[in-house]
Amino acid sequence: MLNSVTLIGKLTGRPVESDSHPAANITHKVALDVENTDEQNRAVIDVCIWEPLAQTINEKYSEGTVVGIKGYLQDLHNQLYVVATRVSFMTPVEADND
């Protein structure tokens, strides 16, 4: 069986660090229908991201950043979530002008 997920959507907040392992969780808002992208037609999906990528997201990106996520589905206590294996940033990072 193949277990593969690809999502493109917006971060709904900063990564939240986990106490039990070196990972962070984010929520990712994606459109369910390409032709109808209003707010009612969106899903919020939980995504687990391992360090150091979670730290990079926390430092450089914020809510509303558009990202592509590749990963696989994981079941934990009868709740499905996505474990990210790759994150592609589609919103450019603003340069520091220090």
Image (tube, rainbow, N blue to C red):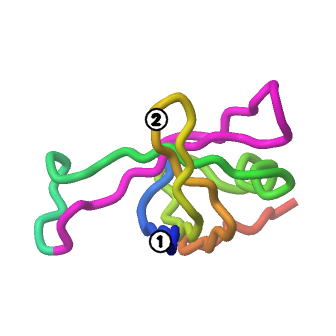
Give the mark count: 2
Q: CA distance from mark 1 to mark 2?
A: 18 Å
Where, by quadrant of the figure, is residue 15 drawn? top right
- Residue 51 is left or right of residue 54, and the answer is right
Q: Residue at x 67, y 33 (%)?
A: 16
| Depicted 85 relative to depicted 80: above or below | below
Q: Is residue 38 magenta?
A: no
Kindly identify which numbered label has been placed on residue 79: 2
Q: Is residue 17 magenta?
A: yes
- Pick out the residue farthest to the top: 19
Q: Residue 3: x and y, percent?
A: 52, 68
Q: Residue at x 80, y 62 (%)?
A: 96
Question: In front: 31, or 19?
Answer: 19
Q: Residue 58: x and y, percent?
A: 73, 46
| Label 2: which secondary element | strand
| Depicted 62 relative to depicted 77: above or below | below
- Residue 92 is left or right of residue 10, and the answer is right
Crowding around mark 2 (Cα neighbors within 10 Å: few <14, some 14 to 19, many 20+) is few
Query: In the rendered structure, are the residues bearing label 1 and label 2 in contact, judged by CB atoms less than 8 Å apart?
Result: no
Q: Which residue is mark 1?
A: 6
- Residue 32 is left or right of residue 20, and the answer is left
Question: In front: 34, or 56?
Answer: 34
Q: Residue 21: x and y, percent?
A: 83, 35
